[in-house]
Image (cartoon, helix red, strand yellow):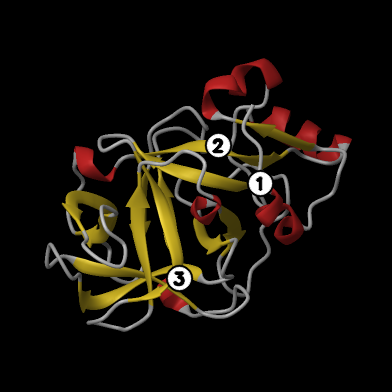
Amino acid sequence: MASLGCQVVDCVLLCVIFIVTVSHTDSKKFHYDYVTCGSVLKLLNVRSNVRLHSHDVKYGSGSGQQSVTAVSSTDDHNSYWRVQGKQGTQCVRGNPVKCGQTVRFTHVTTGRNLHSHHFTSPLSNNLEVSAFGEEGQGDDGDHWVVTCSGQYWVREDKVRIKHVVTQAYLHVTGDAYGRPIHGQKEVSGYQSPTDLNYWRAAEGVFIKPTDHVGMKNLHDEL
């Protein structure tokens, strides 16, 4: 069972009853298979086997915003992201994220949103991916569409995460940084769908629907 470290628990601010902490390898035993609004999770790049990561280290070029990388460690608390609705809209906590839905991913430790724009990435010369905003408040560059084949984002399934403004996919090339983030992989935006931009939900705290009406509506839709 994966759990949020003590550094993260204070940031989560979630209700107690309907929280289940699991790794992606344990999900089936809980009989709830979806990524939901309000969940806090790690995103695993399927091809490279690295997790989306950020930290309070700024890019030395491009936007100068907080850098976003990918790491092989499974227990780094700086790899947790909260799933939220797009700016100005409500994403009801516990509702499954639909395929094609626009969301934000807010970095739990720093409160900045996964972000992209037309700056060039430092290593691969793709599009830069950064973390932007304060306490979850940013701009349209924080919006990403979950692209998957079914009706909802299933935790065990591979998905692509597409940036709304640039239409680029969240991508890992395999290029690695030197100091001060030695060995961490570059994360960039890439214009075409490839095996390098498949992601899957890994460890996290997944919120389940909190009322019978919500569960009934979900079953009716399914």
> How far apart, in angstroms, are the residues tagged by discs 3 and 2?
22 Å
Q: Nearer the viewer, residue 76 or 216?
A: 76
Q: Nearer the viewer, mark 3 or mark 1?
A: 1
Q: Residue at x 83, y 41 (%)?
A: 210
Q: Secondary structure at mark 3?
A: helix
Q: Of label 3 and label 1, which has the lower sequence position?
A: 1
What numbered label is drawn on residue 5? 1
Residue type (three-letter) at the residue carrying disc 1: Gly
- Residue occupied by mark 2: 203
Instruction: Give the crowd class for mark 1: few <14, some 14-19, many >=20 residues within 10 Å.
Output: few
Instruction: Give the position of the N terminus as an image quadrant.
Output: top right
Q: Nearer the viewer, residue 142 or 214?
A: 142
Q: Is residue 190 above or below residue 67?
A: above
Q: Is residue 178 above or below residue 60?
A: above
Q: Residue at x 60, y 73 (%)?
A: 136
Residue type (three-letter) at the residue carrying disc 2: Glu
Would residue 143 be seen by someone viewing this image from the given angle? Answer: no
What numbered label is drawn on residue 31? none
Q: Nearer the viewer, residue 35 or 119?
A: 119
Question: Seen in the image, is 84 located left or right of residue 116?
Answer: right
Residue 17, quarter of the rendered image: top right
Instruction: Give the position of the C terminus as an image quadrant.
Output: top right
Would residue 84 be seen by someone viewing this image from the given angle? Answer: yes
Question: Seen in the image, is 11 located left or right of residue 128?
Answer: right
Q: Of label 2 and label 1, which has the lower sequence position?
A: 1
Q: How many marks?
A: 3
Instruction: Give the crowd class for mark 2: few <14, some 14-19, many >=20 residues within 10 Å.
Output: many
What numbered label is drawn on residue 142? 3
